[in-house]
Amino acid sequence: MSTAEQINPPPRLLMGPGPINADPRVLRAMSAQLVGQYDPAMTACMTETMGLYREVFRTSNEQTFLVDGTSRAGIEAALVSLIVPGDRVLVPVFGRFGHLLAEIAQRCEAEVHTIEVEWGQVFTPEQIEAAVVSVRPAVLAIVQGDTATTMCQPLADLGEICRRHDVLLYCDATASLGGNDFELDGWGIDIATAGLQKCLGGPSGSAPISVSPRAVEVIDGRKHVEAGIAEADDIGRGPRIGSNYLDLAMVMDYWGPRRLNHHTEATSMLYAARECARLLVAEGMDTAIRRHRLHGAAMLAGVQGLGLEVFGDVSHKMNNVVAVVIPDGLDGDGARTAMLEDFGIEIGTSFGPLRGRVWRIGTMGHNARKDAVLVTLAALEQVLRAGGADVTAGGGVGAAREVYAR
Amino acid sequence: MSTAEQINPPPRLLMGPGPINADPRVLRAMSAQLVGQYDPAMTACMTETMGLYREVFRTSNEQTFLVDGTSRAGIEAALVSLIVPGDRVLVPVFGRFGHLLAEIAQRCEAEVHTIEVEWGQVFTPEQIEAAVVSVRPAVLAIVQGDTATTMCQPLADLGEICRRHDVLLYCDATASLGGNDFELDGWGIDIATAGLQKCLGGPSGSAPISVSPRAVEVIDGRKHVEAGIAEADDIGRGPRIGSNYLDLAMVMDYWGPRRLNHHTEATSMLYAARECARLLVAEGMDTAIRRHRLHGAAMLAGVQGLGLEVFGDVSHKMNNVVAVVIPDGLDGDGARTAMLEDFGIEIGTSFGPLRGRVWRIGTMGHNARKDAVLVTLAALEQVLRAGGADVTAGGGVGAAREVYAR
């Protein structure tokens, strides 16, 4: 192994459902040298990052910070910190990531209730309220955008429903945040989590999170500072949170004014997360979302212009990803391999019932760009033709150009 | 917040107990662009990284990989995956991080038994075996190097003791790996975990781990593939692991030939972890450990040459950190601030009973270098003098130079 070479990944244009190419400015931010864990420059950087993510989540929540892990770590941190074993949790499932929320809630020893719609659809507020009334959960856990189906669940009414029935509302915004409307305070969401590797334009490995005051109260009601650093007045209270690493009561004490030692902050990922948010905020959240809407519309028009069918309820599609039905008789995985090997472009497959039935093509973060859309459509046309599909020559790029010309 | 500037941390020489400055080559590796999660280049990079960490841990364990989080995530992944609620776990505590292992084991609902020695000491194998006989634990969890006290616990006899009594042996090697002798196979350790931010010379945020075949058997006996990706023959077995994110049975399926989707690998941290190991392996593990021993000896001689007292049993000190007793009457925190603000050099404080009593000075990873040692000693002499301490002029640098001249 002593002959291992320095890292030299092949150039790829990542147009799948994420991870996507990181913005080069984010990669450069990660190459900044480290400072100590309690260096004033470090704590200032943490505090500044909290402020930037308040703008990204559109919230005034003081408790807006990072969990040191991938987006999945953020999900589990939120659920394990909220859920007391035996709590009823309601999960509306409209794709793979709903199953994930249910699975994580089960491991937190919740009594989990799910409702489901067919893949490719979303829930109405009435369906969700009826389930809330029937289940009477402590927590409603829902995904905003499920990349497995590309659907974007409307959330605007859920906060009011949850408050009316005294339910805490958790939302997994990993795939959607930064590319689709999201209003943490406006919609009454108690906890939302995300990741960097989708519309935020960074690498996986840091999970932005925001926690409302009423969720903070629940979580702080379960605070048990760990032995070895607890002081005399740190008397544990409430049912202890099942994880140490993902214990948000302790993580909030680390990010808060007390700066109580917990993990050693992943400084390079902090730099990355900060830069992702800084670029979005400088662009303007509304502008960034409009950019995702534009390039998503161009990609949608493009694949339709090639004569391909799109999966699911397009009126509820996320801006940043489209599911394309693989034409009958075409080797879907072979086409993906040709896209990657011949053109250096990655598009995605899907999971479960959609595995082998659709490709997923993303336009997000740094890759929500005209050149990325057009080159992907141009290559896809060639690959479809080579695979024997009936394809409209120039139809993909032409339809996308029309969207851009509007 | 839209006025936030690009990241520009102040230049610091990090000579505390870690995190330390990352090797610039590791930072450059992190600036490499991403590839897709299942790109052949990505899976090849993961496989290569597994091989490199086998050399770092000195093991032939197939299951040698990364947990996506800080070193603490690696500890919790190991313990939550091994411990079935109700299991007895024995933790010999000789510093803060022993308390952490006990705390995490408690959250895994183990029946935790601890034995303790005074801070600054380590255990004899006989003390540990007597406790094993008395407690009859399922798991013995122990720290190799506890930065809180600088002690390095001898481990060579523990594997045999554990096998004799049918106990699984977990070791937290976060602070020691790469800078002190460590023989995973040779010492019969079942699981070891680490972090990048100490002797490996990288940023915090990735936790290398290695799992022995007998520990794999225990963990795989608890495998429950999550809903949404499970296939017909994925029948859950054994008591389900309490965490999804830190479920090593699933993480091993992601790193293994099945490549079963779990989290989205934190690619930039993978690049960092790979580069840390690549540099160590190219240097040679024995050479790297000798380098830490040399510069640690120079720093020890240097602080003693300044007339300072060293805390703890120096014959069991880690190579990479020394605890220096703060001279009577000197403002310890004021001196640390002067080191940082006037000289750009960070040294550490400690925890619990040693808080305010010692400074901790590290020589590890990229900073296990002659110039880093000498400049730290030169600055410390000035700060001590300015603080009114009785200090031997030139005594620190002089004593360190003598070590280098040997």
Image: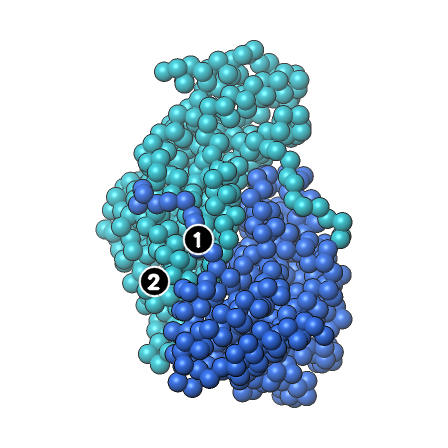
Chain colours: A cyan, B blue
Q: Quadrant of residue B132?
A: bottom right
Secondary structure under tag 2 reads: loop
Task: Pinpoint the chain carrying mark 1.
Answer: B
Q: Does residue A397 sit above or below A58 in this rendering?
A: above
Res. A247 in view: no
Res. A397 in view: yes
Task: Pinpoint the chain carrying mark 2.
Answer: A
Q: Position of residue B59 (x, y in %)?
A: 74, 63
Direction top: furthest residue = A393
The amino acid beneath tag 2 is: Gly
Mark 2 burial class by Cα count in 10 Å: few <14, some 14-19, many 20+: some
Q: Tell me the residue that label 2 is attached to.
A: A256
Q: Does residue B359 sit above or below B130 in this rendering?
A: above
Task: Pick the residue in front: A252 or A105.
Answer: A252
C-alpha separation, residue under disc 1 versus residue under disc 2: 21 Å
Q: Quadrant of the C terminus of chain A?
A: top left
Mark 1 burial class by Cα count in 10 Å: few <14, some 14-19, many 20+: some
The amino acid beneath tag 1 is: Pro
Q: Residue at x 25, y 44 (%)?
A: A186
Q: Tell me the residue that label 1 is attached to.
A: B9
Q: Residue at x 40, y 78 (%)?
A: B387
Q: Residue at x 27, y 58 (%)?
A: A214
Q: Is residue A258 left or right of residue B14?
A: left
